[in-house]
Image (cartoon, rainbow, N blue to C red):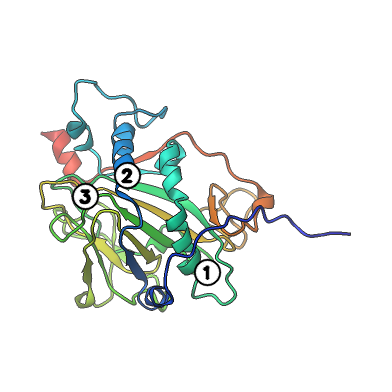
Amino acid sequence: MNNMISSGSQIWVPEVLSDEQVTFFVENGYLAVSNLVSNDGIEELRADTVKLARGGYPCETLEPVDSTLSDQDVLASILCIHQPHFISELIEKYVKHPQISGALSQITAAHIPFWDGSVKCMQSMLFVKPPNFQGQAWHQDEIYIPTRDRSLIGAWIAMDDADVENGCLWVIPGSHRQGYLYPQRSHQDQDEFDFANESYGFDETEEIPVEVTTGTVVFFNGYLLHRSRKNRSQTYRRVLVNHYCNSWSLLPWSVAEGESVANADRRSVVPVSGTDPYAWKGYEPTPNNVWLRQCKALTEIEAS
């Protein structure tokens, strides 16, 4: 009698990173890979950002806007669109981008012996970050999206050059190593950062900026301390950042009725490499909706 449980079909992806790059990620908790997304890819992501912002997809939270408004006017009111891959096939295409998925298959859980390279995605976030919009204070992504094996990883696709002036990422290399989640509190710098709480209790003097060119993808572990500052330039700092983890990890993002903390597992996920060992559970229906993140700059615009 065969008691094997189906783990779904195998997704093959290319290996794109060197051994040195994998080691750098494991030791430092982040890695920037230039030219991983082509110029054509960036242009279609930019165009889809406008389509999303103009309400070009059926969606309750992004209704069609006045056709007389320019694209610039529409984008100027948006900090971040959460879960755009729920409604945009193009964003989902970049969630599953072969080169990005290939890199993820090498580093997502490279700290775990015998890991087979299987990876799944649970979140996408499209940041527009217009001029004068705030950044986000120090935080660790595992505060928001817990995994069972410290394998949460962000893939930060630069749709514009990102530098200190327009609000690039800042990281503290190696701050992921102990797997410690720092406490959080409200911050007092409302001009620099949005409303999200800040992590504290560590030495900030070791932070470094991660300045990158368009088409670069920055990968970072969910325990890595990172932040971004206010956009002080006159241009956008557009980014698509998707979050993934080891497919073998449960995803206790929330605890549903009938679950416990021990077996909670959200199944609104997209496998991108290897196998999905929990495919036998099926997948949660994808909501036909997205969520918008506001910030202090937007409230000032609305009040003016």
Specify which label sits upstream in the sequence, 3 or 1.
Answer: 1
- Look at mark 3 in the image and give the residue it sits on: 237
Q: Which quadrant is home to the C terminus?
A: top left
Measured as percent of width and height from the top left, residue 285 is found at: 57, 39
Q: Quadrant of the N terminus?
A: bottom right
Image point (24%, 21%), residue name = 66
Secondary structure, mark 1, is: loop
Q: Earlier in the sequence, mark 1 or mark 2?
A: 2
Residue under the image location 19 percent in, 40 percent down? 298
Q: Is residue 60 left or right of residue 232?
A: right
Of the two numbered discs 1 and 2 in the rendering, the one whose residue sits closer to the viewer:
2
- The residue lying toward the viewer, choosing from 191 and 94, is 94
Q: Nearer the viewer, mark 3 or mark 2?
A: 2
- x, y percent for residue 126: 33, 46
Instruction: Give SS at disc 2.
Output: helix
Amino acid residing under circle 2: Asp
What residue appears at the point 19 percent right and 56 percent down from the top-left corner? 167
Determine the CA span between mark 3 and mark 1.
Answer: 32 Å
Q: Which residue is mark 2?
A: 40
- Seen in the picture, residue 162 relative to 21 is either above or below; the reply is above
Can you tell which quarter of the image residue 230 is in?
bottom left
Asked if one can make out residue 182 in the rendered structure from this viewpoint, the answer is no
The tag on residue 149 is 1
Please provide percent x and percent y for residue 133: 17, 48
- Mark 3 vs mark 2: which is more N-terminal? 2
